[in-house]
Amino acid sequence: MPTEFEKQMSLVESTIVRVVDNIKKSDSDSWNYRGLELSNEMLVVLISHPNVDKAAAALDVSIGKLADPRDVPGIAHFLEHMLFMGSSKYPGENEYSKLIEGNGGYSNARTSDDHTNYYFNINPSLLPEALDVFAQFFISPLFSASSIDRELEAVNSEYEGKLSNDVRRVYQLEKSTSDPQHPYSRFGSGNSESLRTTPKQRGIDIRQVLLDFYTAEYSSNRMSLAVLGNQSLDELQSLVMKSFNDVSNKKLKQVKYPSDPYSESKRKTICYVVPVKEYRFLRIRWVIPNHKDIYYCNPESYLSHLIGHGGDGSLLSYLKKLGFTTEGWAYGEINAAPGFNFFTVGFVLTIEGLSRWEEIIYIVYQYIAMLRKEGPKQWIFDECKNFNAMHFQFREKESAANFVSNLALRMRDYPLTECLSGPYEIREFRPDLIIEELNEYLIPSKMRVFLESKEFSSIATEKEKWYGTQYKQEYLPEELIKRCKTCELIPEFHLPKPNEFIPTDFQLFSNEEHSARPQLPIKIKENEFCRLFYGEDTFYRLPKAYLYFELRNPLGNVDPLHSNMNTLYVELVKDSLTEIVYPAELGGLQYKLYALDHGIQLTVHGFNHKIKQLLETIIDHMVNIKVNPQRFEIMKEKVKRSLQNFRRDDPDEMARYGVGYLTAQHQWNEDELLSCIDSITAHDLDSFITRMLTRFFTDSLMYGNLTKDHALEYMSLIEQNFQEKRFYQPLFPGMWFNQRELTLPEGCNYAYTMPNDAHKLHAIKIYLQCFQQTLENNALLELFCHFVDEPCFDQLRTKEQLGYVVSSGARRSRGVQGFSVTVQSSRKLDHVNQRIELFIDSIRDYILNMPDDVFKKQREGYMVKKVEIPKSMHSQGDIFWNEITKHQFCFDRPQLEVEIIKSLERTDLLQFYDQYISLNSIHRRKLSVHVNPSAIALQGTNDKKSIINEENTETITAGGVEHTVKLTEQPLIIDTITDKDSKEKENIISEKQINLPKEEWIDNVHVWKSKLSCYPLAQSYEKIDIPVLYKL
C-alpha cells in the first residue's frame, strides 16, 4: 500500500513539467538545490539543508512600474502594498504579518521598473503554514475596499519620505526628461495625487484599476518562486505543489520594452540640477543594448572594469591628480529592463572640477579613445572571468530572506541550471560586441549629462513635476561634441597591469571537522601596547579572513578641532590609497578606515592569501603619510560638506542621532565641529598625526582562515611599523575606558527639538531608558520588544497611517538600554506622541490577554531567531568584534541569553512593563526627540497638506500640567490575538482617556547634561582587566 506522502508525490508529479537536479553550485556550498517548472509555467527553485535555522520564500513577478497604465502612475507599487492585506482563504488584514513576525520572521516586498518581489523568512517549523498564507495572495487576494485608503496613505508617506532624497530626485528627473512616449519616462512610485486625487477627478475607481492590473499583468508564467527550508527537497516540492498549483496561468507574454528610452531629441543634452544636499556630481549616460540573452559574454562588464578602474593609468587616477574629482565609477547595468540598458559614468567633483566639467567630459572620451586604440584584450577578459569564477566559488551566504529574494528575481534571466552562477558567468570573449559598444553607443552624439550642484540655483528655472527638483536642460555646446569626437590620446592613460592581488592559494588551514556553530575567539596576546583575540573558522570553511583593529587614543576627540583633524587624517589616508588598493578590491580584498571618538578603526577582509600584502600597504600609508596641500584642501572641503549636510538627513535618522547625542556623557555636535573646520591648516594636521600615533593601544580580532602564527605575525607587523617610525608609548590607563551613558532621573519626561532643513516631514523618537546591559536584562527587554514589534507597526502604520516609517525595539548604547518607538510623519508631533503613548498604554492588556499557547509560540519563535547563526563569516566576525569594542567579551551571548528567555513568563514581561514602560510608573524615564522642518525646509511651499489638522482628535488644556486626550475618531488600539472578526474591531470607537505629563523641554544641552549622573560602564563577562595596567 502506498503511504499518504507517496500518494501526494504521485499527484505532484502529474503537475510538474520539468525537474532540474543539476543546478550549478560552488564546491563550498553544502545546500541542495532542485529546479522545477510547473504545469502552470511557474519556475521554482527549492533549497534544502537539514541545519538551516531560518526558512524563507520569495515570489518574483516579472512586471513592475514600467507596466503602469499611463493615466494611473504608481499602480504596480500600490498593488505590491495591497497584495498582503488579506486573501479569501485568510481574510485578516494583518494575519500574514502576525504569523511571520510573531514567529521570529520578517517580511517585505519591493517594486522595480520590471519586477515586483515578495519575500519572507520564518521559523523553519512554520514554513508549511506560512507558504500557504503567502500563496493565497497570488490566488485570491481581497484588495479590500476598507484597506485601500489606509494603504494608499502608506504609499504616499513612502513618497513623501523620499521627496528630499537626491538619488530619487535625480533618478525621476532623468525619467521625466526622457522620451515621453516611452514607459521609462513615467512616475512609478505613486502618491495621493496619482492614485487618489486625479483618478477621482476623472471618475476612475482605483480599486477597479488594481483588480484590472492584477488580472492583466499577474500570471503564473511570469512568476518565479524560491523556497528555502530544512525539509528534504521532496517535502519542499510537495509543499509548493500543495500551495501554488492553483495560481492561474493566463499565458501572458514576457514583456519587452522599446530599445530607446531617450529618443534623438533628448541626446546631447545637459541637465543642471539643484540638489537638496551640498555636493557636486557629474554623470554621463548612454543607452546601450540589453545583452541578457547572451549574459555569458557581458561586454558591459569588460568596459565597466576598465572605465571604472581606479588604479595606475586610469581615468579616475588622472582626474584626481588634476584635482577635479574625489571619487568615480562606471556601471554597465543600472535601471536596465527587457529591451534596453544604460551605461553610466559618474564623478564626485571638487570645486575646481565643477567649473571644469566640459574638460572632464572631454577627458572621459580621451580614455575611451585609448580603449578603442588598444582594442579588446583576451587577457583582461580572462582576468575578469577568473575574478567572477573565484567570487562565485567562495561566495558567502546572504541572509535567508535576501537569498531567496535575489534568486527569485534573476531566475528567468538564466537557464535554471545557472540560476545561482548566472550573474558570475563570463565565458565567451566577444571583442565584436565590445567594439560595437565603444564605436556605436559610447559616443558623444548619444550621451546625456547630468551636473548636480547648488551652484545652479540661479539658472535652474524648471521644476520636475513629481519631486519638485529644480533644473535647467539645454543642448551641450556643439563645439564640445566635435572635440569629443576627435579627441587626442594622452600618455597618462594606459591599460591596467596584470593584478598582483589575485589570490591563487585557497588552502584551508583548519584540520578540524566542520563545527555545528562558529568557534569562539580566544585571547592569544596581550601587552602594554596591544591585545589580540583569535578565532579559527571551522564553520564557514572559506579561504577568507577578517582582521579588525582599534587604535585607541582619545586625543582625537579632546575638542572639536582634534575631532575634525582625526577625520581629516583618515580621509587623507584613504584618498592616498585609492590607486594602490583598487586592484586589491578587484582581487576580493577590502578595507575600511574610520575615525572614532576614541581613536581609529581599521578592518581588512577578504581572501586570506594576499591579505598581509594589503595590510602592510595600509599601515605604511598610515605611518608615512605626507600631507599634500592640494588633497588636504579637497578633503577638508569634503568633511565640511558632510557636516553641513547633517541638517538635511532624513528626519528619523536625525531623531536617532539626537537621542544618542543627548544621552552621551560627552559628544561634539555638528555646529561645534563646523565652527572650527576652516581654521585647520596642513601644518596643524601634520603635528596632530605625530601626536596621535605616538601613544595608543590596539585591540584586535583576527577571525577566519588563518592560524595563530598568522595572527601573531600580523599583530607584530603593526607594532613594528609604528615603533620604527614613531616614539611609540603605551596608553595611560584612564584613556582606555569607553564613554558612559547619562542616567535619566526617574519620573522624567524630557523633550528636545531639532530643525531639519530639507524635509517637510516630522519625526519623533521616544526613548524609555530602562537599565544596564546584563544577560538577564537583555533577555527581558528583547522578548518584550519581540511581542510589541508587530502590533506597533500594525496599529501606528497600517491602521492609523501615522507615517511610512514606524519602528519599535531595543535601543542600546554605551552599556545601557531601553525601549524606543520611532515615527516619521506628516502629522503634528503632539498628535503622534499622543498616539504612540496610547499604543504603549494598550500593551499591558495585549500581553495580559494573550492566550498561553500563543505566548509560548511567540517566545519559541524569538528563541529560534536569537540563536540563528549569521549566514556570512563577515557578519559573524562583526558580532565578535562588537563584543570586544564594547569591552564586554561575551562571545557566546546568544546561547546564554536564550536560556534566560526560555524561562521568562508572562508575569516577567508585565512586571517589566509596570516598572519601566507604563505611563503610571513613578520609575518611568522618558526622553523624546522631535525633528521638525525648519523655515528653510518650508520656504517656497504653500502645501497645506504637509501638516494634517488633528483638531477633532485631541483636546489640550493650555498651560496645564497635564494634556488630556479624548480619542473619538481612531480605530481600536490593539487587535486581540485571536482572529475573531478583526474588521469589526477596527471600527470600534475608543472612548478611552489618557493623561500625559507635561514635557520638560531641553533648552541648553550642556547645562542639562551637567545636572545628570552617569551609569557605570557595563562590566566584562570575562575576567579581562584593563590591559594597560599590567605593565604600568
Image: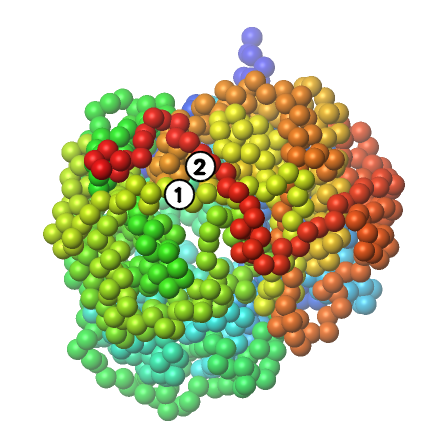
Q: Amino acid at mark 2?
A: Leu
In the image, residue 1000 sits, relative to residue 10, either above or below, namely below
Q: Is residue 98 visible?
A: yes
Which corner quadrant of the image does residue 824 belong to?
A: bottom right
Contact (Cβ within 8 Å) of mark 1 with mark 2: yes
- How far from the left and from the top, in percent, is residue 1006? 53, 56
- How far from the left and from the top, in percent, is residue 906? 66, 22
In the image, residue 206 sits, relative to residue 284, either above or below, namely above
Mark 2 secondary-structure assignment: loop
- Of the numbered discs in the image, which one, if any, rests on residue 1017? 2
Mark 1 secondary-structure assignment: loop
Which corner quadrant of the image does residue 181 belong to?
A: bottom right
Residue farthest to the top? 1
The residue indicated by pointer 1 is: 738
Mark 2 crowdedness (10 Å alpha carbons): few <14, some 14-19, many ≥20: some
- How far from the left and from the top, in percent, is residue 789? 63, 37
- How far from the left and from the top, in percent, is residue 609? 19, 43
**Which one is nearer the viewer's eye here, 491 or 185?**
491
